[in-house]
Image (spheres, helix red, strand yellow):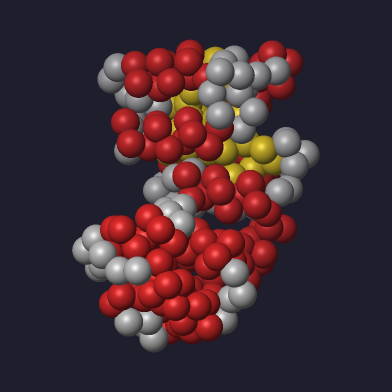
Amino acid sequence: MEKEDGLIHLVIAESRALFCETMKAVLEGEPDMRVEALANEGHTALMLSEELKPDVLVLDGNLPNGDGLAMTTMLKKRLSETRVLFVAEGPDEELLDAALLAGADGYVTKDGTLDDFVAGIRTLARGEQFIPPTMLGGVIERMLRRHAEREEALRLTNHLTKREREVLSLVAQGLNYDSIAQTLVISPETARTHLQNVLGKLQVHSRAEAIEFVRRHEPLPSLQEVEL
């Protein structure tokens, strides 16, 4: 499709017909926007997006036949030029973080203002990211906190020997002492000793906490460098 200069072309993917039609009416009232298609479930949303290649896809996070986060990741891989505005039921910090990690370019809520909704679309169309002002401060705080936590995790794992990193990597994959011993050609007692050293250096108290440490901070370069 040949797009007209100056217009933001949109696909709206929303499960509730009334809300979908309301969004369409609002957006078509804007002089710089054109709604190309509506979808009420995931398969249709992906098909229309691939066919029409909209500037912005307005994506309901609870769309039937398509988890909003998974759809966001899939769409961004297939259509990197299409911007995704993730629409959530309400403010949810965990969902906001997950949506951004999945590749969403913006996040709005259904209980937010129309001004935020329209501004979000225009912001995305300019190639920028949009987060409601009321949630932005929390995002920055969490990013700073995660950065500090990751720096601390890197500091701790850098204290591990090569063998200890190997053991930790295998523990994170779910292997027990016998399996670790077989893989590394060491005794189960030696594997246990290495793991105890790992727990002390990471300042955790159990295998489960060590696994959670790796999961929470992955990917850790110091573990990726280990050749097993």
Corner quadrant of residue 138:
bottom right
Q: Residue furthest right?
A: 111
Q: Against 38, is 223 above or below?
A: below
Q: Position of residue 97 (x, y in %)?
A: 58, 53
Query: Which residue is more in the foreground, 187 or 224?
Result: 187
Q: Is residue 86 left or right of residue 179?
A: right
At horizontal 38% and vertical 37% (from top left) the residue drawn is 76
At horizontal 46% and vertical 81% (from top left) the residue drawn is 197
Which quadrant holds the C terminus?
bottom left
Query: Which residue is more in the foreground, 155 or 24?
Result: 155
At horizontal 61% and vertical 75% (from top left) the residue drawn is 205
Q: Is residue 170 left or right of residue 16?
A: left
Q: Is residue 146 left or right of residue 20?
A: left
Residue 164 visible? The answer is yes
Q: Position of residue 9 (x, y in %)?
A: 43, 27
Q: Against 8, is 198 above or below?
A: below
Which quadrant holds the N terminus?
top left
Q: Position of residue 36 (x, y in %)?
A: 46, 17
